Image (cartoon, grey):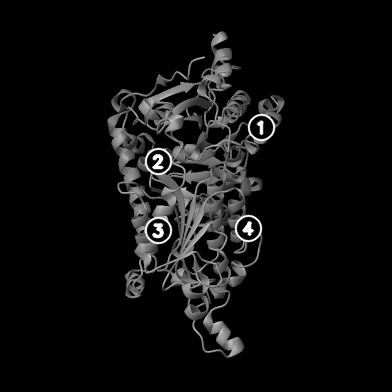
Amino acid sequence: MAKMILHRIGDPLEKFMDMKVYEKNLKSMKKLNSRYDSILNEIRAGWGEKYIERVHKKNKMTAWERIELLKDEDSNIFPIGSFVNYGKKFGDPGSEKISPGAGVITVFIKISGRYVTIIANDNTVASGSWWPRTPEKIQRAQEVSLRLRIPVVYLIDSSGLFLPEQSNTFPGKYGAGHIFKMNSKLSDAQVPQIAGVFGDCIAGGGYMPIISDIVFMTEQAYMVIAGAALIKGAKSQNITSLSIGGPDIHVHLSGCADHRVPNDKSLLKKIIKEIEKLPSSGADYYRYGDCASAPAFPIEEIEGIFPDNYRINYDMRQIIARLVDNSLFREIFSEKGEEIICGIGKINGLYCGIVSNNTELIENKRSALEKKPGGILYKEGISKITSFIRSCDDDGIPVLWLQDISGFDIGLEAETDGLLGFGSNLLYSISNLTTPVFTILLRKASGAGYYAMNGLPFEPVLQISTPITRLSVMEGKTLAIGAFNTKLDDNFNIIAENDQEYSKIEQGMKDVEERVEKDMDPVASASQMDTDEIVTLSKLRSYLEMLMELSYQSTGYRRVKNPRIWSIHDLINIEESGE
């Protein structure tokens, strides 16, 4: 049995697009990108230059400076959870405060050629305090690390809970305490954890480094269950946090830390040395002698291929051609369930399965006179996805979902076709996948179709949105029609007894539509952790390269079959024998 044979897909822009339309789309996308870049710069600045200077006056580095020093030269930083809490204020009325990124930075970086997860308190935001959603953000990064067996590095510099909001941070199933359970689960799974304590490490935060395999402390660092101020109040003792929980205590007496170092830079160099001791990445082994290659067409072209109006269709295969290596792709059952594209490609030299929506009109086998809209799930497409992802799971191939979906088919035909049953079969299958899965919300992510294409409730390792993502149950206009259905006729025209009533209904529908449109803003979704990150389309390929390498870096914990013995070959054989 040969390894997978892939085929070239895609075309140069001028072959399938009007270049004036392309330029118009590109102009619209650049405007959106500018907004996201501006927001990211605002978030990354923390509480601003004044607080950066405060950190430097203590002879400490900011969290971002520490990350920059840790990462390999000429490698990228891949953040997740950047937008958490964006646009929200916390604290007592009149003294509300913002918490950029929930006061914690979670990123993937390469250290000595290996990807690691970094969880770093942002010491420019209330001295690294924990805010509402800070625990959830930390746990999300820990979850990814656990599922992919990626080493975790904690850069701890936190004064504990932001107390005015303690009721929204401390209790609950995924409150602050659940971080320590995740520490324990990572340890049980033998995922390396290394902690660097650079300053404050108080109360619950004091437990965060303890379950790590190795704990470093600078001379300014301390770990305490209760800070000096609290102890002074309770026991009238004249002490400092450093004197009761500094390296003198925890390195030399309690044994809660392993090594003391003079300063930030020394500690970071020690972390790099420890990462060097770990097994190297298995990704190159799983390239099977191949190498990573760029797509045949520039990834930047994607930004002009997507229409500036979400109602307009486009060719998804042209998108895939600009994401996979050499624009090589082996589509499976291309003539069945045409609303869905399933196939195998390589990203970063590594095999992955791709499931994507086809938004273009498709053949209607029940009527030669009309076509059916794409971007909707019908019976054959659902069955195709189910068979394909089960084979990927059996073979250990990571699955990449590219969503642009309006939902399931509806109506008499859908019900008599048993769409509910086929949909349940698909939901069962995605719920029990063991291979790494990643979901990209390219554009529309609507209704139950969002679930069926492995949306966040079905626990992809990561879900990424783009600047044009529209995540909702239904579009604003459709929802407004549903909300005012009793006031509309069969053609959705307003029924009113007078002009005043007509204007009231019209305004009500407009308000509903505007509210839904606002809720669909991907920044709003990312702020409340309904998606993990927003990535501009031109940077999507580099994110996918990182995700594929994460999937293959650690060896021995999941099934990865030799490509010669894939179950996928059986699907291809069945397809070809039926031609």
Say which amino acid is labelled 4: Lys
Q: Which mark is residue 423?
A: 1
Q: Which mark is residue 540?
A: 2
Give coordinates of residue 342: x percent, y percent.
Answer: 52, 26
Residue 310 seen in render: no
Q: How far apart are labels 3 and 1 at the CA level?
A: 51 Å
Q: Earlier in the sequence, mark 3 or mark 2?
A: 3
Give coordinates of residue 406: x percent, y percent.
Answer: 55, 37
Query: SS class of the residue under badge 1?
Result: helix
| Mark whose residue sits in front, 1 or 4 | 4
Say which amino acid is labelled 1: Gly
Q: Nearer the viewer, residue 114 or 54?
A: 114
Image-based side of 145 in relation to 177, left or right: left
| Mark 4 closeness class: few <14, some 14–19, many ≥20 residues within 10 Å | some
| Mark 1 closeness class: few <14, some 14–19, many ≥20 residues within 10 Å | many
Give coordinates of residue 358: x percent, y percent.
Answer: 49, 28
Query: SS class of the residue under badge 3?
Result: helix
In the displayed structure, 157 sits above or below 213; it is below
Say which amino acid is labelled 2: Leu
Q: Earlier in the sequence, mark 1 or mark 4?
A: 4
Q: Are marks 1 and 4 in contact (CB under 8 Å)?
A: no
Say which amino acid is labelled 3: Lys
Circle 4 residue: 181
Circle 3 residue: 270
Q: Earlier in the sequence, mark 4 or mark 3?
A: 4
| Mark 3 closeness class: few <14, some 14–19, many ≥20 residues within 10 Å | some
